[in-house]
């Protein structure tokens, strides 16, 4: 069984994150909000994103164990949607976390790594006792990602438009997560 862990992302991960952004599944899954007019990620996007990290706006690198070392396979963003300064989610109650995940290389998808990385991210969120639920906002058109999230335990709640992006918001409460993992 492969082991997957999360570590905080740093400025040194910028080239890796930029490379992963070149993958079509990654760009198409993240909507249009970071793209410039050519459909290319704006210059300096990752420099900025990594620099503005805080306890309410964090990126992690998911790594899979290979031999004696760890190989980076994807990225995860965890934010407090009520408190983070970009107010991406608009008016929203406190005590939530919002997660985004992408595996950078096509060859690393469909192998269960996403499930393990997502589980680690969810556990990390619920380790803070005040966190009542976690929300996610896949594009409504990203049926594979929606299926993936639902398999992890998220339930669709409503459609919501973020910028130009038509998303299907999903949620999992602390009680729902615990019920799925009782006795483990
Ligand atoms: C969505 C994603 C994180 C899932 O991680 P994963 O490791 O591929 O998922 P798992 O191996 O645990 O589960 C595979 C399931 O994920 C789904 N999936 C979603 N996108 C997929 C892809 N590009 N390739 C393979 N499986 C994908 C499939 O429905 C698959 O289910 P199946 O085995 O019944 O066909 C990953 O595929 C990915 O990064 N995709 C591209 C970016 C993206 O869509 N991110 C979500 C943004 S909201």
Image (tube, helix red, strand yellow):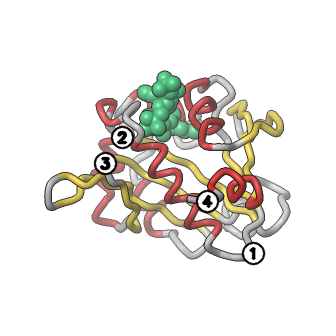
To which residue does mark 1 refer? Answer: 130
Tell me: is circle 2 under 8 Å from ligand 1.
Answer: yes
Residue 79 pos. (x, y %)? 62, 62
Label 1, label 3: how many angstroms apart (C-alpha)?
31 Å
To which residue does mark 3 refer? Answer: 2
Judge whether 10 appears above or below 101 on screen.
below
Element class at badge 1:
loop
Q: Nearer the viewer, mark 4 or mark 1?
A: 4
The single residue placed furthest to the front in the displayed view is: 183
Disc nearer the start of the sequence (2/1): 2
To which residue does mark 4 refer? Answer: 183
Q: Nearer the viewer, mark 2 or mark 1?
A: 1
Judge whether 101 appears above or below 61 on screen.
above
Disc nearer the start of the sequence (4/1): 1
Label 2, label 1: how many angstroms apart (C-alpha)?
31 Å
Disc nearer the start of the sequence (4/3): 3
Circle on res. 104? 2
Q: Nearer the viewer, mark 2 or mark 3?
A: 3
* Residue for point 75% across, 40% down: 155
Q: Nearer the viewer, mark 1 or mark 3?
A: 3
């Amino acid at each position: 069984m492969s082991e997957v862990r999360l570590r905080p992302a740093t400025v040194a991960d910028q080239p890796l994150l930029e490379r992963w952004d070149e993958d079509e599944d990654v760009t198409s899954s993240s909507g249009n909000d970071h793209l410039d007019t050519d459909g290319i990620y704006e210059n300096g996007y990752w420099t900025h994103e990594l620099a503005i990290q805080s306890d309410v706006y964090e990126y992690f690198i998911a790594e899979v164990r290979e031999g004696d070392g760890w190989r980076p396979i994807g990225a995860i963003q965890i934010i407090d949607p009520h408190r983070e300064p970009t107010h991406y989610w608009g008016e929203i109650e406190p005590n939530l976390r919002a997660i985004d995940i992408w595996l950078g290389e096509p060859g690393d998808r469909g192998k269960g790594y996403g499930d393990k990385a997502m589980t680690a991210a969810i556990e990390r969120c619920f380790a803070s006792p005040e966190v009542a639920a976690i929300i996610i906002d896949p594009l409504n058109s990203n049926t594979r990602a929606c299926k993936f999230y639902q398999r992890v335990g998220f339930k669709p709640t409503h459609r919501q438009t973020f910028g130009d992006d038509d998303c299907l918001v999903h949620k999992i409460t602390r009680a729902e997560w615990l019920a799925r993992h009782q006795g483990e």
